[in-house]
């Protein structure tokens, strides 16, 4: 043990104090860092800060004004996501194992972090009083300091010395996810927090009484955790079913749509319209797609394929300006685009089968969306947007990436296409979207977009924002991916051709995996940018996470007066943003490492 | 009976004519070596045979199927013709095993176990069964080229095309690749080999051809080609490289 410490000390000395210059640099930086954190802690702890302005407004932060009687929809959505996640982790359960020493080491490091902050925290801090005078007060008494220091030090020593005792075991890395999630959920049941209580005169009782966390928070989370765990075991059990993986992928694909319609609408479905118009249209287009898929490589049909394409596009053009129902118009557009892709994919019976499935799913989704989306909103909320806060930020980020990434892949491929029309259209879309600032697109979504949509179709502001966001970040994704495509040598295409792969197989098995791998860092930074840029929606009157903290809570006076407490909220918002982006970039580094295997 | 027939094949790159009417045929089981100075159109010609390049005039008939714009014909021919490139062109994101099984699984629609068995068999044939789970980037050039040969053989082609398979290799690795090719030639595979390895040509070729400026200058048996060439161009070429 002494040896180990000596060795560490030596390497520390070598890396930090190797020369006079680096020693000075090390000391100066340490001094700056410590003072920075001291200042932050002192700032956070003075008595003029009211952190309950954050804690008491969690609901506002999460969903803004979403009606409380419909909360069950939100919980169900979160729960369903966790169930799917549990199933997937079970099905794709990795065989990687984490060593016990790694786990202990991370506990040890965490403890060290807490120790560090406890030691450097200032005893006194000052703030500006209401009358402009500087008030200095004790913020961190010796008793509190020791009260934290001693147990945490013991904790650190235990996890440091455990490696010298022969405790060695490994844990499956998938299981660890549940362990780490278990800690906060269990804490919900034990932690007591100061809670705002009002007396009969509606005056806040000070000091705030310390109370357990509300049942409306801890019960749902516990239920969700349990279902997460249960579905994990079910997933492991289902692993052996043959096509389970493709079913899961499809479910993930459909989940956002389901959640979207759940949270957004109480669809009022008019059966006569469904039977009289939706189903026949659905059937006709399903048949049309089926015929195209079946006969596309038939030699007679092939001869006239370009004629067929031309006629279809012409029909679409006429159809869009005619009085056809919305569903038929959209389907026409879809079949025209679909027909362009089919010849390349439909070369084998397997390709035909998957094409047919894709086509059917696309039609079902479209029908569902148009029917559900066009019905009146059943959920009534004051203001222009149905919900805000973190849900909105999250929705914009997830849904934005979810739609814009595949769109980006398609646009990138399209821009490299041999067919001039496709190339020109894709280049046009990319250049047009990128050349206009995001804020302009947001105004376009809120003010002008309605003009471009066919009469009778009205989308909620959030949906319109999602539409422009998908294109905007899709264009950026497309350019990134195109960069990746250009880095693939010509020999890779030729080798794939030479072993007889179809164009579709060549792109999806050889070219895309390599191109995407080459651009993961840029893709992740695009995703992070999209996540943070979602706060710009405040400018068109949507209440995202940041706006709730800064504007809404900062001006809140009923039932509790929080006016002027926006600094605490801004810090909280910043920390949450940081946690998410940091996790994302960490994850991507791991993925990169994993995929980098092939490179020397 | 000839398995490849070309009639007056012509090919332009823009204004530049790379092939100026090539007429030849290859019999089943024959090993044909193509040589000629740099830029003479050797690569262009054999790449036309599996449609990596498109010829503009003339006819190419492989195993009774004519190469036209018909995608079906192109795919049919490509699955009969294996190709080995100068720069290997292995797929760097897949293991050696996956490189070899990929086409069997996706193009031939075989199941995984069957394809892996076949892949192991081929890796043994080219002498590197122990490298199956490595990535191409972790192999030497000679090993990579042998994997590339195994990958092409996995499609069970009737014809193999080699475009200077040893030009990018260090001298000590050339032999290991040539040995694999000799063994392949002896097993009765139809081969067209573009190479500067005259030793290989003397030992295994049934016929040798000389290309110059997009034309087929000489076509002869190896003995006649090296000892008693018909054209002066061949004499000049031989004097330069031997
Ligand atoms: N894609 C292309 N575009 C334009 N010109 C080309 C292209 N490919 C080949 N050429 C030209 O065609 C001619 C024949 O090229 P080819 O690669 O067939 O020569 P080669 O006989 O294989 O030579 P080497 O021994 O150097 O490989 C050369 O002059 C070359 O510059
Ligand atoms: Mg060449």
Image: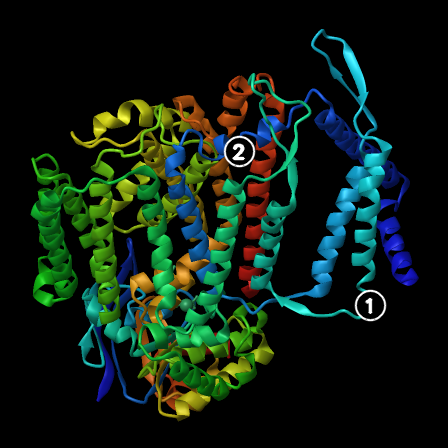
In this rendering, would A191 be left or right of B189? right
Q: Which residue sits at x=62%, y=52%?
A: A183
Q: Nearer the viewer, residue A518 or A364?
A: A364
Question: What's the mark number on residue A165?
Answer: 1
Disc 1 and disc 2: Cα gap in Å?
44 Å
Relative to residue A571, is residue A434 drawn left or right? Answer: left
Indicate whether A429 appears above or below B136.
above
Q: Position of residue B108 (x, y in %)?
A: 31, 77
At 88% from the left and 49% from the top, the residue drawn is A13
Specify the label residue A58 is tagged with.
2
Location of residue A581 (image quadrant):
top right
Report if the beta carbon of the residue with label 1 is closer than 8 angstroms to ligand 2: no
Mark 2: secondary structure: helix
Image position of A561 with respect to A320: above or below: above
- Residue A257 percent location from the top left of the image: 32, 46
Relative to A266, does residue B226 appear above or below in the rendering? below
Q: Residue B64 versus residue A465: which sits nearer the camera? A: A465
């Amino acid at each position: 043990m002494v040896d180990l410490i000596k060795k560490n000390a030596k390497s520390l000395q070598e890396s930090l104090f190797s020369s006079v210059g680096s020693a000075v640099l090390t000391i100066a930086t340490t001094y700056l860092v410590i003072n920075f954190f001291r200042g932050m802690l002192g700032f956070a702890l003075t008595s003029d800060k009211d952190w309950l302005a954050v804690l008491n407004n969690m609901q506002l932060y999460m969903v803004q004004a979403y009606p409380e009687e419909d909360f069950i929809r939100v919980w169900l959505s979160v729960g369903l996501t966790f169930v799917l996640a549990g199933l997937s982790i079970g099905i794709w359960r990795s065989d990687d194992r984490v060593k016990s020493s790694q786990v202990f080491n991370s506990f040890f490091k965490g403890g060290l972090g807490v120790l560090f902050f406890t030691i450097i925290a200032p005893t006194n801090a000052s703030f500006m009083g209401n009358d402009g005078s500087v008030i200095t007060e004790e913020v961190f008494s010796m008793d509190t300091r020791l009260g934290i220091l001693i147990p945490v030090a013991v904790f650190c020593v235990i996890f440091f010395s455990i490696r010298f005792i022969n405790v060695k075991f490994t844990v499956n890395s998938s299981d660890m996810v549940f362990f780490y999630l278990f800690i906060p959920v269990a804490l919900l049941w034990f932690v007591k927090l100061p809670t705002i209580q009002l007396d009969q005169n509606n005056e806040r009782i000070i000091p705030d009484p310390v109370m357990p966390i509300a049942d409306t928070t801890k019960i749902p989370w516990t239920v969700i955790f349990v279902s997460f765990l249960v579905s994990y075991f079910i997933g492991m059990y289902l692993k052996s079913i043959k096509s389970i993986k493709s079913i899961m992928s499809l479910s993930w694909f459909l989940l956002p749509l389901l959640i979207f319609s759940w949270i957004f609408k109480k669809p009022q479905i008019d059966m006569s319209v469904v039977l009289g118009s939706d189903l026949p249209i659905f059937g006709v287009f399903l048949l049309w797609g089926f015929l195209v898929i079946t006969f596309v490589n038939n030699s007679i049909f092939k001869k006239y394929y370009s004629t067929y394409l031309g006629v279809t596009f012409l029909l679409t053009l006429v159809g869009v300006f005619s009085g056809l129902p919305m569903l038929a118009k959209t389907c026409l557009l879809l079949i025209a685009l679909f027909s362009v892709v089919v010849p390349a994919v439909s070369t084998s019976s397997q390709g035909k089968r998957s094409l047919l499935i894709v086509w059917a799913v696309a039609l079902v989704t479209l029908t569902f969306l148009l029917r559900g989306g066009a019905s009146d909103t059943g959920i009534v909320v004051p203001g222009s947007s149905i919900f805000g806060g973190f849900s909105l930020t999250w929705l914009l980020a997830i849904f934005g990436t979810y739609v814009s990434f595949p769109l980006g892949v398609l646009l990138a491929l399209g821009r490299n296409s041999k067919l001039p029309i496709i190339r020109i259209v894709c280049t046009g879309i990319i250049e047009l979207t990128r050349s206009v600032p995001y804020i302009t697109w947001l105004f376009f979504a809120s003010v002008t977009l309605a003009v471009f949509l066919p009469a009778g179709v009205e989308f909620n502001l959030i949906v319109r924002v999602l539409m422009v966001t998908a294109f905007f970040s899709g264009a950026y994704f497309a350019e990134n991916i195109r960069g990746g495509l250009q880095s693939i040598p010509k020999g890779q295409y030729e080798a794939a051709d030479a072993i007889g792969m179809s164009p579709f197989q060549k792109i999806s098995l050889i070219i895309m995996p390599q191109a995407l791998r080459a651009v993961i860092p840029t893709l992740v930074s695009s995703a992070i940018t999209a996540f943070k840029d979602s706060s710009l929606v405040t400018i068109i009157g949507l209440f995202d996470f940041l706006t709730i903290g800064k504007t809404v809570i900062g001006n809140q006076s009923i039932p509790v007066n929080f006016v002027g407490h926006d600094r605490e909220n801004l810090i909280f918002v910043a920390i949450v943003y940081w946690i998410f982006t940091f996790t994302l970039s960490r994850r991507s580094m791991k993925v990169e490492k994993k995929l980098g295997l092939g490179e020397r | 009976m000839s398995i490849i027939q070309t009639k007056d094949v012509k090919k332009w790159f823009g204004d530049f004519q790379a092939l100026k009417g090539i007429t030849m045929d290859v019999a089943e089981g024959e090993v044909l070596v193509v040589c000629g100075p740099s830029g003479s159109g050797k690569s262009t010609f054999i790449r036309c045979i599996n449609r990596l390049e498109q010829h503009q005039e003339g006819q190419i008939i492989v195993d009774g199927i004519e190469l036209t714009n018909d995608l079906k014909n192109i795919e049919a021919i490509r699955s009969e013709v294996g190709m080995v490139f100068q720069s290997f062109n292995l797929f760097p994101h897949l293991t050696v095993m996956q490189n070899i099984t990929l086409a069997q699984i996706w193009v031939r629609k075989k199941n995984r176990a069957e394809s892996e068995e076949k892949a192991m068999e081929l890796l043994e044939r080219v002498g590197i069964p122990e490298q199956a789970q490595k990535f191409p980037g972790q192999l030497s050039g000679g090993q990579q080229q042998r994997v590339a040969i195994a990958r092409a053989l996995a499609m069970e082609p009737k014809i193999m095309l080699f475009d200077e398979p040893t030009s990018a290799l260090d001298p000590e690795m050339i032999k290991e690749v040539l040995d694999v090719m000799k063994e392949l030639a002896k097993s009765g595979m139809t081969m067209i080999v573009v190479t500067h390895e005259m030793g290989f040509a003397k030992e295994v070729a049934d016929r040798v051809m000389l290309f110059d400026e997009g034309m087929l200058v000489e076509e002869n048996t190896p003995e006649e080609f090296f000892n008693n060439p018909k054209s002066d161009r061949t004499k000049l070429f031989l004097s330069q490289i031997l």
